[in-house]
Every structure is written in C-alpha cells, then in structure tokens.
Image (tube, rainbow, N blue to C red):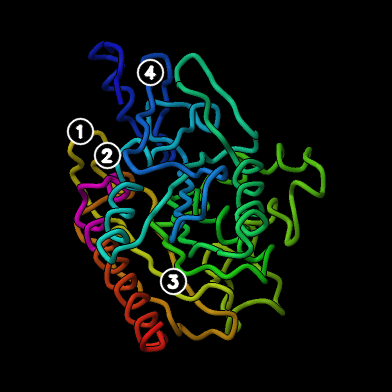
Amino acid sequence: MTSSRCSPTTRFLRRLMIGGLPLVLGSCMVVAVRPTSTGTLDFSGPAPDVVILGMSGHCAPPCVSPTDNYDNLGHNGTLDLLADAVSTAGYSVQVSGYTSSVRESFGFPRVSPEQRGWPALRRDYVRIRREWADDPPRLVLVGHSHGVPWLHQLVRQFPDQPVAALLDIDGVCGLWNLDHRAALMELSAELRGQPDIAQACQPLPPDERPGGVRVGPGDLVPWNVERGLEVQSFKGALVPEPAGDYPINVFWDQHANLRPDGSRRGLTTGTSVLEGHSHLADSGSRGMRWLAGELRRLAQEWRGQESSRAVPGE
C-alpha cells in the first residue's frame, strides 16, 4: 500500500480511539492494489486442480469503509501464500480476490484498479460449477474479518456445492451491518440469495443454532464444507503492530466454528498470540504461516487419498 504524505497531526488523529473504534481519516490514503503472482481465475481454459477464492474485509485506517475496501488478501500476498501451500502437493491453482462490498465492481480515486464485491463473488462461485461440471476443481475459500460472514453465508446458499476447505482469518461482524445491510436490502432477492446475505451478521434463529449456541452464520460451517480451518487473533491484548497504528486489538473472533449439530468434526482452530486483527491477514504473519501449513498438510492428504483410490496399471 502506498500512502501520500500525511501531517504529524493527521497521523496522531488516526491513532485516536473514539468509543473503542478507530477515528478514520481517508484524505491521505492512496492504494494501488498489487495483482497476485498466482494465475487468476480463467474460465476460457481447462479447470485447474484447485481454485482459491478470497474475500477481504473492512479496510484498516486511514481508509474509509466500505467505499475504500479493496482486495487486501491479494495485495498482501496472502492468496499467493495459500496457493503455494497447495501447489507443493503438485496441484495447479488459480485464485480470485474480492472485496467486502455490495457492488459488482467499483473504483474510486483512492483505490485502483476496480475492485469486485459480493455479486461478482456469487456469480463466479456459480459459474465454477457450471463451466467445469465435468472436471470440477477443488474449492478453497478464505476470508478475513468482514470477509468471513460473506463466505459462510455463500456456502449455505449452495448446499450441493462441495467446498474442500473454508479458511477463516479472525472473522468478525462488528460494523458489518452498518457498512452493508442497508445497501444489501436494495438488491434484488435473487442477488441476495437464500439464506439472505443481508442476514449474514444476524444471530441464527433458535432452530438453526448449532448445539443451541447463540452464534451467527459466520461461526457455522455447514456439511458441504469438508474441512474448516481458522486462525484467531489474541483476544483483547495490547498488540504492537509493525506500523505502530494499533496498540490495542479492538476486534477479534468471539467463537470457534461449529458444525450444525454443535460438533467440531473436521474443524481446526488456532490462536496467534501477540498478533492483532489487521496484521494477522498479512502473508508474513505467524498466524498465516500456521494456516498455510495446515492447508499444505490438507493438500497432501488429498494427494494421498487420490493415490489410494487409483487402480494399478491405469
């Protein structure tokens, strides 16, 4: 991320906390979003072995969310890190990054190139199965912060679509409704889908709560997801971030993920101590290295399963 020069006063104000939330000033931020080094999703050719779709979250100060949200997971090399973890098992991989937004695509003077939001994610998700029905790739979904509720609701909307792995990086709902719910209610019912994406950060109704636990869709992993992996930041710690902008970890994932029956079958949760919510999604964080290692082991399991099913001589 590149930032235009900010005055010392502006840098100080950016770090003020009002009511427990950062004071956001967007006038000094410019982001040229870097592309991934991994090949991007391409429907014009044969299916890759694995497709990784990443949904980034609420952008960190000094940007203004949701208008300045961008594909942070691609920009910071996080999608490339996960793609490399899968490719070590010999798989071909394509990636696509999306931003936490109600808009299909959008661009603003402070963010370039154009970014793609929920409608684009949902369209591509459906198209993967339609275009490559004869040779479907394994699907890996990864979300950070606000990106997690989008993805969890997406996989619930398509219960017949298998997902090989759902990766959560400190999923939260704080400010999600404020950022998106009103705009979502203006979309057509078809674009919102069912269960309604506008309900992604509302508590589940009593008859859908896993094991009776009062959580939202962002903590529910449905059975069409084979494996769930999540990493959480340390809860409430004083965390010195590299840029010095976040001395207090304001947001963190409140619950470990659960299956619909309240079990944790096929789910793994890790906590990265001394890493805050924003830094956790960076490709160089300890938490991301752990998550990439778990995905690498999972990809090796896939390869082992394929080998055991192979018929000698074929």
Residue at 50 percent across and 48 percent down: it is: 146
Q: Is residue 204 left or right of residue 82?
A: right
- Mark 2 nearby-residue class (10 Å; few <14, some 14–19, many ≥20): many
Q: Earlier in the sequence, mark 3 or mark 4?
A: 4
* Magenta stretch contains residue 286: yes
User: What's the distance in space between the residues labelled 1 and 3, CA to CA?
Assistant: 31 Å
Per the rendering, the mark at residue 243 is 1
Q: Is residue 180 left or right of residue 239?
A: right
Per the rendering, the mark at residue 313 is none
Discs 4/1, front: 4
Q: Which residue is mark 2?
A: 246
> What residue range appears in magenta?
279-290
Helix, strand or loop at label 4? It is strand
Q: Is residue 13 left or right of residue 18?
A: left
Whether pointer 2 and pointer 1 mark residues with C-beta atoms closer than 8 Å, the reply is yes
- Mark 1 nearby-residue class (10 Å; few <14, some 14–19, many ≥20): few
Can you give x and y, in whole percent of width and height, for residue 200 in the image?
Answer: 63, 56
Give, as a three-letter code, the residue at label 3: Gly
Q: Nearer the viewer, residue 228 or 202?
A: 228
The quadrant where residue 17 appears: top left
Can you give x and y, in whole percent of width and height, for residue 248 in the image?
Answer: 27, 45
Helix, strand or loop at label 3? It is strand
